[in-house]
Amino acid sequence: MNTPTQKTDGFLTSQARHVRQCLREARVVVVVWLVGFAYCGTTLSLLGWIPPDERPLEPELILGTPSWVVWGLWLPWLVQVGVTWWFAVCILKDDEPYQDFPTEQLASNEPHCDSN
């Protein structure tokens, strides 16, 4: 016979797999974000500031935008959008339908938020 504790333990064991999957996906997101942040910060600091005595009269433009904006913002953002789409389509997993948490044990031990 299954006790409420055994039902809860089985539920938590099955949900641990979901937590591990979420943590793996979160690691990918954090790494992609940190790489993009480091690239943008480095590129913008190197290309975006030119000492006043070395500045040209006309800045280098690409499609009417300063080149440091194109290489430091547009390029990494477009790459990250592409990586995010690839990650969502090819890597991100859809779990099986959500399992309800066994409420028999909770009903007897914890007060409900909507009780007055």
Image (cartoon, rainbow, N blue to C red):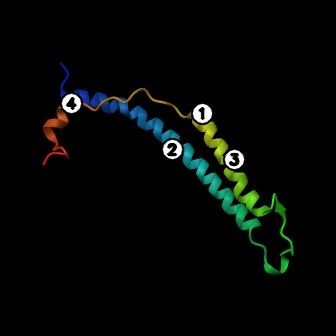
Helix or strand or loop: what does disc 2 sit on? Answer: helix
**Image point (71%, 64%), residue name:** 44
Q: Tell me the quarter of the picture where residue 16 sits.
A: top left
Of labels 2 and 1, earlier in sequence is 2
User: Which dot, 3 or 4, sits closer to the camera?
Assistant: 3
**Amino acid type, callout 2:** Ala
Q: CA distance from mark 3 to mark 4?
A: 48 Å
Q: CA distance from mark 3 to mark 1?
A: 15 Å
Q: Residue furthest front?
A: 64
Q: Confirm or deny contact between disc 3 and disc 4 (CB under 8 A).
A: no
- Report whether 115 appears left or right of 67: left
Q: CA distance from mark 1 to mark 4?
A: 38 Å
Which residue is label 4 attached to? 5
**Amino acid type, callout 1:** Val
Q: Nearer the viewer, residue 53 or 4?
A: 53
Of labels 2 and 4, earlier in sequence is 4
User: Which dot, 2 or 1, sits closer to the camera?
Assistant: 1
Helix or strand or loop: what does disc 4 sit on? Answer: helix
- Report whether 67 appears left or right of 106: right
Q: Nearer the viewer, residue 17 or 105?
A: 105
**Amino acid type, callout 4:** Thr
Helix or strand or loop: what does disc 1 sit on? Answer: helix
Q: Nearer the viewer, residue 22 or 59?
A: 59
**Image point (71%, 55%), residue name:** 74
- Report whether 1 appears left or right of 63: left
Which residue is label 3 attached to? 79
Which residue is label 1 attached to? 89
Quarter of the picture containing the N terminus is: top left
Of labels 3 and 1, earlier in sequence is 3
Disc on res. 26: 2
